[in-house]
């Protein structure tokens, strides 16, 4: 009989999703639990939804089924073998530094024992609050001594040095 796990030998995965959406995070959890050989993960965060769609979205059906607060999703879930044993590179594109987006990179940094490279590509809508929160990832205790964390600023970011000049 064939093994029904289609993801067992998957080594690279690219996925478009919203890291602020609990339903999509639960799906990502399930997929990662099935990816026993994953080495490389790329997440493209979908452009933000309209304010009306966000305001009318019903998260209660997902949140009420969780036996822990929704902000503890990655912290409370069973560790995925791929994050602990095989995942080497992760790239997250379209990052804004919102609370929901911060959970997954935080989990990777503190639990990814084999992680070598984490790239976070910031979105053009990146706020100063999101920037400060994202920079906080650099001070987290790391599970892997070999991990390098690269924060890529948005392409439209204007950098001004202390003397008022631009690099």
Image: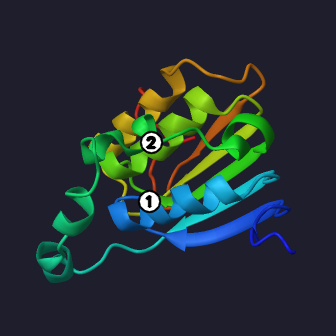
Q: Quadrant of residue 114?
A: top right
Asked if residue 155 lies left or right of residue 6, the reply is left
Question: Can residue 164 be seen?
Answer: yes
User: Where residue 93 sits: x, y (%)?
Assistant: 56, 61
Q: Dot 1: what SS?
A: helix
Residue name at image x 55 percent, y 73 percent: 16
Q: Is residue 70 above or below residue 35?
A: above
Query: Which tag, 1 or 2, sits closer to the chain's start?
Result: 1
Residue corresponding to mark 2: 74
Asked if residue 25 lies left or right of residue 110, the reply is left
Asked if residue 41 lies left or right of residue 107, the reply is right
Q: Is residue 72 above or below residue 1?
A: above
> Are dots 1 and 2 in contact, CB under 8 Å?
yes
Q: Which image quarter holds the N terminus?
A: bottom right
User: Where residue 154 sits: x, y (%)?
Assistant: 50, 57
Most extreme residue toward the front, as rendered? Answer: 1
Q: Dot 2: what SS?
A: helix
User: Where residue 147 sits: x, y (%)?
Assistant: 72, 29
Spatial separation of the CA atoms under disc 1 and disc 2: 9 Å
Question: Can residue 115 be seen?
Answer: no
Residue corresponding to mark 1: 25
Q: Which image quarter holds the C terminus?
A: top right
Residue name at image x 38 percent, y 41 percent: 131
Residue name at image x 56 percent, y 27 percent: 110
Asked if residue 37 lies left or right of residue 139, the reply is right
User: Where residue 15 sits: x, y (%)?
Assistant: 61, 70
Residue name at image x 49 percent, y 45 percent: 104
């Amino acid at each position: 009989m064939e093994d029904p796990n289609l993801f067992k030998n998957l080594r690279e995965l690219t996925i478009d999703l919203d890291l602020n959406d609990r339903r999509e995070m639960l799906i990502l959890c399930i997929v990662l639990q099935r990816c026993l050989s994953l080495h490389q993960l790329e997440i493209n965060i979908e452009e933000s939804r309209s304010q009306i769609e966000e305001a009318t979205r019903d998260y209660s059906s997902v949140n009420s089924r969780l036996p822990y607060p929704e902000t503890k999703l990655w912290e409370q879930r069973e560790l995925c073998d791929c994050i602990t044993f095989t995942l080497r590179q992760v790239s997250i594109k379209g990052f804004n530094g919102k609370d929901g987006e911060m959970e997954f990179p935080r989990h990777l940094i503190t639990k990814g024992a084999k992680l070598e490279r984490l790239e976070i590509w910031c979105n053009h809508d990146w706020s100063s609050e999101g920037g400060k929160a994202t920079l906080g990832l650099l001070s987290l205790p790391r599970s892997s001594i070999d991990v390098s964390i690269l924060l890529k600023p948005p392409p439209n970011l204007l950098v001004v040095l202390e003397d008022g000049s631009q690099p």
